[in-house]
Image (tube, helix red, strand yellow):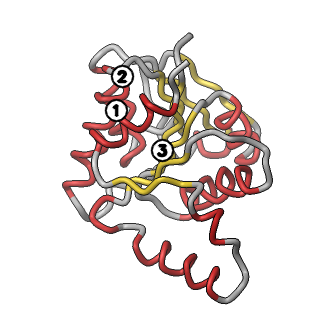
């Protein structure tokens, strides 16, 4: 059975063209490795780049978008499946339910919310699905430093920081998924 990888990422391009190129590479690589992609459903930013590049090579791509965002955020076309849900909470629940692993690219508040939702889920035992943070260009360095400080000050269990793998390139992400998701 095909495994689905949820890709959490921004609906903006950001200021680093290399990040957009890597998002395109990731979409193609996931599709070429036989993984389905689950994502936020929009066609803008890194979100759209991942989806379009996977679709271009014949990949299966499932979009999940809240009704309230469809008026502000254009929906990606040519998806294998599209779910329009009531709200962001339902979006996250369905994305997690339909996915076997999570890859987190650069993004804003929504991406951080999604990252912490799945990381907290792992921490409390709701799931054991792999979480991979694509720390391209050191995007997440300061956040990871903050979390290490929170551990140092006694607010986090440092062992839980090991629940997410930090990766810097697409090849390593695919290799880790292949190893982690062997049936």
Q: Which quadrant of the structure image shows residue 133?
A: bottom left
Assess whether mark 2 and mark 3 are in contact (beta carbons under 8 angstroms). no
Identify the image quadrant of the C terminus: top right
User: Helix, strand, or loop for circle 2?
Assistant: helix
Separation of residues labelled 1 and 2 (CA atoms) = 6 Å
Which residue is identified by label 2?
Answer: 31
Query: Which residue appears at 37% of the width and 53% of the height?
Result: 167
Q: Say which mark, if any, is on residue 27.
A: 1
Query: Which residue appears at 59% of the width and 30% of the height?
Result: 100
Query: Which residue appears at 43% of the width and 78% of the height?
Result: 142
User: Helix, strand, or loop for circle 1?
Assistant: helix
* Residue 123 screen position, x and y as percent: 73, 56
User: Helix, strand, or loop for circle 3?
Assistant: strand
Which residue is identified by label 3?
Answer: 103
- In this view, 94 is above or below 56: below
Identify the image quadrant of the N terminus: top right
165 relative position to 21: left or right: right
Mark 3 residue crowding within 10 angstroms, few (<14) / some (14–19) / many (20+): many
66 relative position to 55: left or right: right
């Amino acid at each position: 059975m095909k495994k689905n990888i949820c890709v959490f990422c921004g609906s903006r391009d950001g200021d680093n063209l290399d990040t957009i190129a890597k998002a395109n590479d990731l979409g193609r690589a996931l599709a070429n490795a036989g993984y389905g992609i689950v994502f936020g459903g929009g066609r803008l930013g890194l979100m759209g780049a991942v989806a379009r590049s996977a679709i271009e090579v014949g990949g299966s791509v499932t979009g999940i978008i809240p009704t309230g965002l469809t008026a502000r955020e254009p929906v990606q076309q040519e998806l294998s499946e599209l779910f329009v849900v009531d709200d962001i909470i339902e979006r996250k629940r369905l994305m997690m339910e339909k996915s076997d692993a999570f890859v987190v690219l650069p993004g804003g508040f929504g991406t951080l919310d999604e990252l912490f939702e799945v990381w907290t889920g792992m921490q409390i035992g709701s799931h054991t699905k792999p979480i991979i943070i694509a720390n391209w260009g050191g995007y997440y360095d300061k956040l990871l430093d903050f979390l290490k400080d929170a551990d140092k000050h006694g607010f986090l269990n440092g062992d839980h920081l090991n629940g997410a793998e930090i990766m810097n390139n697409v090849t390593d992400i695919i290799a880790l998924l292949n190893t982690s998701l062997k049936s």
